[in-house]
Image: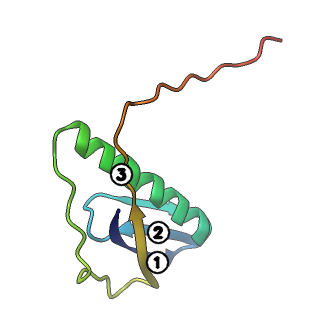
Amino acid sequence: MLVYKSAYKWEEGVCLGEVLDFPGTVSCGSTLNEARANLAEALRDMAETNLFRGESLPMPDEQRTDHDADLEEPIYLLLQTGQQLSRQVTVPAP
């Protein structure tokens, strides 16, 4: 498990989230909980993209900080190995 640092700030009624030590990982939400969930999904997507491209993941840096943030807290990335599962979405027939 990798522990990165997330930062949140409120601007114009929107909660903006960023993973400070994983460049490009940003999201937002209308509430803090929504921003947290969206940021967790963005972190997963960014990590998958790096790995699919054969790029390494940035190492967490506990020294990173955003002095303008209203809140900083850890965000966890759990990596699992194994066969990729295929997902299928179906719609019931009327």
Residue 38, horizontal then vertical, whole percent: 51, 57
- In the displayed structure, would residue 33 be above or below residue 55? below
Number of other residues with Cα within 10 Å of mark 3, as a class: few under 14, some 14 to 19, many 20 or more = few
Which of marks 2 and 1 precedes in the sequence?
A: 1
Q: Which residue is mark 2?
A: 16
Which residue is farthest front? 82
Q: Which residue is mark 1?
A: 9
Between the C-alphas of marks 1 and 2, the distance is 5 Å
Residue 90 located left or right of residue 68 = right
Which residue is farthest top? 93
For the rendered model, the colour scheme is: rainbow
Q: Are marks 1 and 2 in contact (CB under 8 Å)?
A: yes
Q: Which residue is mark 3?
A: 79
Which of marks 1 and 3 precedes in the sequence?
A: 1
Q: Dot 2 lies on which element? A: strand
Which residue is farthest right? 94
Residue 65, horizontal then vertical, whole percent: 29, 83
Residue 72, horizontal then vertical, whole percent: 42, 81
Which residue is farthest bottom? 67
Q: Dot 1 lies on which element? A: strand
- In the displayed structure, would residue 29 be above or below residue 73? above
Residue 80 located left or right of residue 89 = left
| Residue at the image point whose x is 35% and y is 51% from the top | 79
| Residue at the image point whose x is 61% and y is 23% from the top | 89
Q: Inspect the image, locate mark 2, and give the three-letter code of the amino acid beneath it.
A: Leu
Where residue 78 sits, quadrant-wise, is bottom left
